[in-house]
Image (cartoon, rainbow, N blue to C red):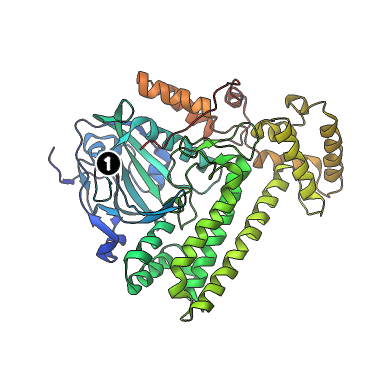
Amino acid sequence: MTKGKAIIKTGWNLDNSYARLPKSFFTKLDPTAVRSPRLIILNYPLATSLGLNAEALQSKDSVEVLAGNRIPEGALPLAQAYAGHQFGHFTMLGDGRALLLGEQITPLGGRVDIQLKGSGQTPYSRQGDGRAALGPMLREYIISEAMHALGIATTRSLAVVTTGESVIRETELPGAVLTRVAASHLRVGTFQYVSNWGTAPDLQVLADYTLQRHFPDVDDAPNRYLSLLQEVIKRQAALIAKWQLVGFIHGVMNTDNMSLSGETIDYGPCAFMDTYDPATVFSSIDIHGRYAYGNQPPIAEWNLARFAETLLPLLHVNQAQAVKLAQDALSDFAKLYHCNWLAGMRAKLGIFGEEIQDESLIDSLLNMMEKYRADYTNTFRSLTFDTPEDTVLFGISEFVQWHELWQARLGRQQEPKASAQQLMQNCNPALIPRNHHVEAALDAAVKQGDYSVMERLLDVLSNPYAHSPQQADYSTPPVQSTLPYQTFCGT
């Protein structure tokens, strides 16, 4: 199929600031054309916020753009180079099946990356085919949009198109391309790549670009590169706390999957926890539990230490002093994370102020939930609506005592119980993307070509704090199985 400029008024307003960085940071190339693209799902609200015409995006020419067969006006497609520690082992990486089309300038003056995922081979494909299967692309669409609705910083999904071609994994699967929208695709791994294979000026250019793009308010700080490290640490502490508060498990927290903007990125073997257990792992390749739910905060700190290492030449001319500055900054992560998590947990329990005993109250509840295998989301939902009989904890003497202490704690605060309940409703979702519902939606779409199951799921997930009757059927935990639920990277 002939490539060329797509002449259609869809509202593309693309710039290419990343393409103006040193050429070693990327490789320019066009997407690989596909046989017969078909639009499967389009994110209307997101399209509108980007300044795009949602109706025009459904035209034949626009679907060709979303598939990579045509290049939109103003785009300069490129594959970004980066490196990363994958399960602790450092390696050279890069966009092996994705291309950055450019940066959309939104009506409000924002700048976001527009990336095609599954768009063909690149120099960084490492013998991969550069393609993506429909199921994993729909999974990313569902989970990323659910995360957005939960109020968690995340990349977003604009569209998924099928390609009319198959990809071979364990079996033959329908191919697809996802259009991903991100604050940027700057990663810890981007800095690791430049630190290892670039020059000192390259590293400074990348750091300056990151500051200008994401942290312009600290660009004039006395030590701007220390401020860069501190700001990234702050955003990651807030992000990981929000993951923990809703029971989200990323599954593959490699350094190349940590975005410097503070967004959740790269939805591979991700899933949400049903039964509360800090050791929960879903990813089929995480056999040692490196990225288990309870390990996510320390792994984030480990990843940030790798980021700090890349910045050492910029922090201070004296290496010992640079190391000291980095260590001091990193020592703040655990405190920042804990403050975010504790504030979030207080809100989940309707607590407005602070008392020394609050943390003990929270820990006692979580310990009971783990001991008696309580459902994480539904336990907090039952507390929100004062229906403890809906949990497995009901009637257990430990829980009865805990419940009395909790009620006494609420009684000591000035805010009325109605305000506490409203706070809890705002912080405890009625539902999450339950793994069995996600799988049902993907099975219907991939195996039967039925997208209605996914559409209904997306609808109820779009307002998780509504606590509407329509959401009740989607809040039910899965039937107990002797086989553990597993997720896969989907590459």
In the foreground, 316 or 102:
316
Query: Could you say whether the residue bearing mark 1 is in a helix, strand or loop?
Result: loop
Query: Do we see residue 419 in this rendering?
Result: no
Task: Determine if residue 277 is in view.
Answer: yes
**Crowding at mark 1 (Cα within 10 Å: few <14, some 14-19, many 20+):** many
Which quadrant of the figure contains the N terminus?
top left
Residue under label 1, please give it.
Answer: 130
- On the image, the x and y values in percent for residue 449 come to 35, 21
Most distant residue in the bottom direction: 318
Amino acid type of disc 1?
Gly
- The vertical placement of 48 against 110, above or below, is above
Q: Nearer the viewer, residue 286 or 350?
A: 286
Which quarter of the figure is the C terminus placed in?
Answer: top left
- Classify residue 249 by image quadrant: top right
Q: Position of residue 187 (x, y in %)?
A: 42, 56
In this rendering, position of residue 89 left or right of residue 101? right
Which image quadrant is residue 276 in?
A: top right
Residue shown at the point (50%, 38%) measured from the top left: 287
Image location of residue 38, percent across then percent down: 27, 30
Residue 35: x %, y % from top left = 19, 32
Of all residues shown, which one is farthest toward the left? Answer: 2
Count the marks: 1
Residue at x 30%, y 40% (from the top left corner):
118
Q: Nearer the viewer, residue 118 or 6?
A: 118
Q: Is residue 343 left or right of residue 146?
A: right
What residue do we see at 38% from left, 47% from top?
181
**Residue found at x 52% / y 25%:** 436
